[in-house]
Amino acid sequence: MTDPSPNTRTAIKLDIVVIGAGQAGLSSAYHLKQLGLTPGRDFLVLDRAPQPGGAWQYRWPSLTLSTVNRVHDLPGLSFADSAGGDDSVMASVAVPHYFAAYEERFGLNVLRPATVNVVCDRGERLRVESDRGLFSVRGLINATGTWEKPYIPDYPGRDSFRGRQLHTQQFRTAEDFSGQHVLIVGGGISAIQLLDQISQVTRTTWVTRTPPRFRTGPFDQEAGRAAVKLVEDRVRAGLPPNSVVSVTGLPLTPAIEAMRTRGVLERQEMFSEITPSGVRWADGRTLDVDVILWCTGFRSALDHLAPLQLREESGGITMTGRLATQVARDPRVHLVGYGPSASTIGANRAGAVAARELTGFLGITPTQR
């Protein structure tokens, strides 16, 4: 397929568009091709990023292969074979290299940079409007993840703070905070990793909304399935998804043990308001800080799907299908990397199931190709 011009108003007809070329999007595209669909003719992958790598290309430099959570293989190509054996390589380099090799190996023909502005219902088809053209499709696999939608809670006084506020998404190096008192907010894996780094170069205070749960002992497949099911049950009920880590707990690693020994895991309860010079707790205690680092997670980047009215009054989306990737309100739409498929291994499985279920729903079979 030739590169569509952003100036043309004629919609290019395809069976399926995949939005996003991270782990879930690439898995979906691979399985669509395995089912007999041709990239660029029957389906197209649109990706907003300027190069392969999904959100990984934006991660902070200190996140190396030795510190990142495991990068699971995409179907058909081993990550280890692509990345080599050097664990000191930055994840923001190694994973994009792997994704680029994957796209080339399987000829997925990702169109980038391509920003999808809106998806609208046009009766039997969906209209996908992007800055690289218009597309009329029978079905959609959305794999936009969360990186582009950082979440910062709206605490009283937030706009009055005279210091610096930033989100995990904007973090680069711990040395940027040398000589400053940094308040780190959040109880997830990223918060722990950044607390570890920053506390080694300057003063830190750690606050979380709920007491952190550290997990000891092995985390086997049965425990993993049970954790994912809790998230899956929520989205099947139309509730906003919780993160998988919120139910799995934090692994008690040697690095975390070392942090405990250094005394940096002395967690404070969440403050009640932000002041011009810091924060104040409900009991009147105050703390002056120079920086507030919000490690408060992300939300699903689904604003472009708003015209489809997929959400319930609860704010969630009722999901169905084998792995809860199919939208109950519009079965032509699958969300991968959402809810129970937000983890990398979950994204792989979700891509496979979404491809099969969507092509089945649309009546597309390999014999038609």
Image (cartoon, helix red, strand yellow):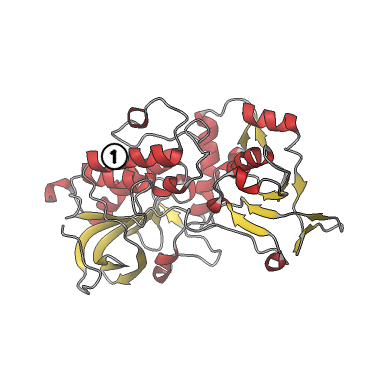
The residue under label 1 is which amino acid type? Tyr
Between 14 and 325, the one lying in front of the other is 14
Between 300 and 316, the one lying in front of the other is 300
Quick one: quadrant of the N terminus? bottom left
> What residue appears at the point 57 percent right and 58 percent down from the top-left corner?
151
Q: Position of residue 102 (x, y in %)?
A: 29, 39
Is label 1 in a helix, a strand or a loop? Answer: helix
From the viewer's perspective, is 322 left or right of 247? left
> What residue appears at the point 68 percent right and 28 percent down from the top-left corner?
257
> What residue appears at the point 23 percent right and 73 percent down from the top-left corner?
7
- Asked whether residue 208 is in view, the answer is no
Q: Residue furthest right?
A: 284
Q: Position of residue 13 (x, y in %)?
A: 19, 64
- Asked whether residue 57 is in view, the answer is yes
> What residue appears at the point 50 percent right and 47 percent down from the top-left corner?
232
Q: Position of residue 326 (x, y in %)?
A: 38, 54
Residue that carries the numbered disc 1 in the rendered image = 102
Task: Work out whether 147 lies above or below 227.
Answer: below
Q: In the figure, residue 74 lies in which quadrant?
A: top left
